[in-house]
Amino acid sequence: MNKPLRRVATAMMAMIVLLLANATYVQVIRADELRSQPGNKRTLYAEYSTPRGQLIADGKLIAGSEPTGDKQFKYKRVYSDGPVYAPATGYYSFIYGSSGVENAEREVLNGNADSLALNRLRGMLTGRDKQGGNVELTLDPRMQRTAYQQLADDGVRGSVVALNPSNGEILAMASSPSYDPNRLATLSSEKQQQAWEELSDAPHDPMINRATSTLYPPGSTFKLITAAAALETGDYDYDTPVTAASSIELPNSDATLPNYGNSTCGSMPTAPLWEAMARSCNTAFAEIAGDVGEEKLRETAREFGFGQKINIPMSVAPSSLGEIEGPAPLYQTGIGQRDVRMTPMQNAMVAAAIANDGELMKPHLVSKTLAPDMSVLERTEPERMGQAVPEDISHTIRDMMVKAEQYAGDEGKITGVQIASKTGTAQHGEGKDPHGWYVAFAPAENPKIAVAAVVEDGGNVGANATGSKIAAPVARAVIRAGLQGGG
Amino acid sequence: MASTATDPGKPRPPGTGSQESSAPSQPTRRGVELVMLAFAAVIVTSALTLVSINQNSQPTTQILYYGLAFLALFGLAHLAVRRWAPYSDPLLLPLVAFLNGIGLVLIHRVDLGNAAEAARTGRTFNAAAPSQVIYTALGLVLFVLLLAFISDHRSLAKYAYTCGLTGLVALALPAVLPSVIAPSINGAKLWIRLGPLSFQPAEFAKILLLVFFAAFLVSKRELFTTAGRRFLGIDFPRARDLAPVLVAWAASIGIVVLERDLGTSLLFFGIVLVMIYIATERAVWIMIGLSLFAFGCALAYPLFNHLQQRVDVWLNPLTSESGYQLRKALFGMATGGIGGSGLGGGYPSIVPYAESDFILITAAEELGLLGLAVLLLVYMLVTTRGLRVALAARDSFGKLLAGGVSFAVALQVFVVAGGVTGLIPLTGLTTPFLAAGGSSLVGNYMLVALLMRISDSTRRPQQPSKPRPQQPPIAEAHTELVERPR
């Protein structure tokens, strides 16, 4: 019986070798793949066992880490003014992952970034726990708060984006309705699940960052781009006469395209280009779009950022002109209707480029990353996206926008500050109240702030809503908060 | 056969001479056992200290008492071995003590994780470590009793049929009992619950059936070796000689169907096959058995949803809907990596049954691939030491029993470790000595006692003065075989 016994011994050893080989396969060869699987809680637990870095804006703590006393989740994420900053911070949940800056800067915040390698080594040597690095945002807390409150206090839906035209810093990025990321940071999975379901089922998607993710028809604010395209052709200048007709027939179609309220553009048969802009005459800009052609219009829009991949660091949905099939749709595109879609971020970029002598700066939300001891790891350098329009043309458009501001209502006007602006009232389907837009920069001669505001579905005004009625006061309040520090 | 028992190449360890012995030429090597036990106690105590540091950052002197209690417990077992089995293998007890101790530490560690989880969610939980300590003591008591009362393993052969019948009944008991006494836990009907006590009769049935098969096969060896038809160059047994294998096969199928336990079924069938193979020295039995196994699988697979589920989980652990157990286990292993998170530094409680079925995953996460490899190699040592006992045994019954016991442990380790690491489909079996579970622990200590009893007889000096009129018939059969002219 010894021969089979020896064979059984060999078989037993083979079984152990098989087990060891398989364990090596799982624990070494496939380890990275398995570790990064979405359902793997351990990776998250490891994150929760060290204090996550802070999110700071102008010295104000927006998101911090608090010790919990719990053994598995040693720290908890805490947001101050959660709904105000949610579009920027995003959430940080152990069930649903993270979004916003929490996600984009996770390597710095959880301490795993390459730039923090020296800190980790120092921590290892001194036996201190790993600490996350901090992230300073470009947001201006006063403007951010104003932007959110202007929308939320009135109970309207929409978004406001404010940029520093000279360097692309995002000074405010608000979205309404919003949500409190603290609800998703709770350490009770039941409460997290409940919050998630409530927020997912809530009307109007409070977790969406409208500033970067929602594509709106821009309405008349798009005339800035049509005007820029026209001026770039050299065939147009500030005073070029354009049609003042109250309505025109669309080419190759029996449909007509009227001005707002079916009014003429001034009292003459033609109006100078600046007046067409100031009065926002649809007929004029529809004809201009037909004149400059689709190709030129697309090129100009692209130079302002349309269709480009932009990460602020979160990705911004690319704005687009849509398909333009024939001259009639081109006419409509020229006044920002048809299939033109823009994010509030993109519209703020248009205003910012015009404000910055035609030079478009890449919008960004993170001004610098900091080590746990607040020493600077990395500073975001302003990045140039290109010259959207030549400097002189940008000044021409600015002058038109200063004129336009005179037609854009008085509500929330700031005395002593000259604003350059363009309003928009975008139809988006039968029976729906229009979206109101207002893009602007101020002060006109020495721009510090470029802003775009959109209020959805007529705000509180209904079918008679216009950009100057519902969006302009919001944006002006944000500009005032930025320039004067007022709320 | 007997010549392999002496091991003349090994030097005589110091400190073993004091043991009184009728044959001074044969060292008992009990000193080695004691030193190795102390070594195991040191490792286990260090492991417990690490858990404590990583969980509370305050190791208390209490840990030292635990370590000493552990050493004292196994010291008592060691004294019993000195008294009743002085010539037995000196490594078996320290090896299983090491496994048992590491198991206790891991169970305690999972308890801490579960306690934290329970504190957060407000659920209740029962710590498994305290009862495991009691089962360890109980296991050692039975270990000692077995050594004390069975002075010669050959006497067991006399009760072969009693053992066989009792074993079968015990195996079938949970299946036929009403679910008040035999509840279905996690789909398997394996348990008997009497008031606060619950146990798995299969663990004890295993021992009884091992004894039965060893005795039965030794007495009926002729039957199995009689050549039937020769086909394709292989001697096939006669059809009627297939009966025992077919009975074992049918019983295995019965377990799967009635108790829904794939692991136990696989284990029993594998043990029977290998014991027949050892007894007959004919590999054709393995082939027949494997064919029957494959046939059984093919038969059962389309009929039983839980089999299909298991296979689906095994093939697609990351995507299968019911694969969360294995998925979590694989995540734990991957997070542990080569070196592990350190005892107390990981999150083993994420994996369900981290203290029982999946305890090897707890080890793999916190001790890493290295720790898992150590545990598997210790199992290999235990089972190959067991086979050494079998090789050295002087009688066929002892040889077969020791071989069967060793293989049973090895197969069980393979099935459970292969299952939780995704090598083979997952089946519910306990990891011998490591996993929380009283029946398994106590049963395995009884198996080790049997091994040590056989081992003791192989190395015990022959006493020529002792007349052997009452020699059991089994040993005679063995003598007959050796002398048979070929």
Image: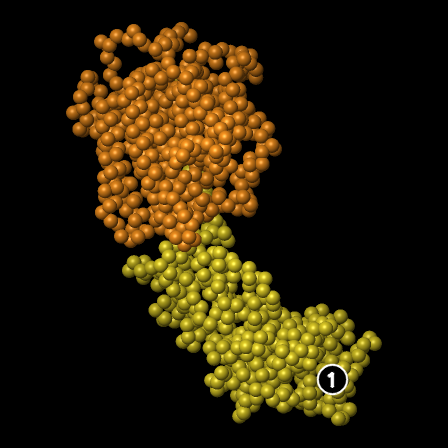
Chain colours: A yellow, B orange
Q: Circle 1 marks a residue in which chain?
A: A
Work out which quarter of the rendered image holds the N terminus of chain A and state it: top left
Furthest-left residue in view? B18
| Residue holding disc 1 | A261
Tell me if residue B70 can be seen.
yes
What SS does tag 1 mark? helix
Residue A399, percent from left and from top: 62, 89
When asked about the image quadrant of residue A78, the answer is: bottom left
When asked about the image quadrant of residue A422, the answer is: bottom right
Residue A293, percent from left and from top: 73, 77
Amino acid of disc 1: Gly
**Residue shown at the point (38%, 26%) measured from the top left:** B406
Q: Is A150 in front, or is A451? A: A150
**Residue shown at the point (63%, 83%) measured from the top left:** A469
**Residue shown at the point (52%, 32%) measured from the top left:** B260
Residue B33, percent from left and from top: 25, 30
Q: Left of A474 or right of it: where is A321?
A: right
Q: Is residue A128 above or below residue B212?
A: below
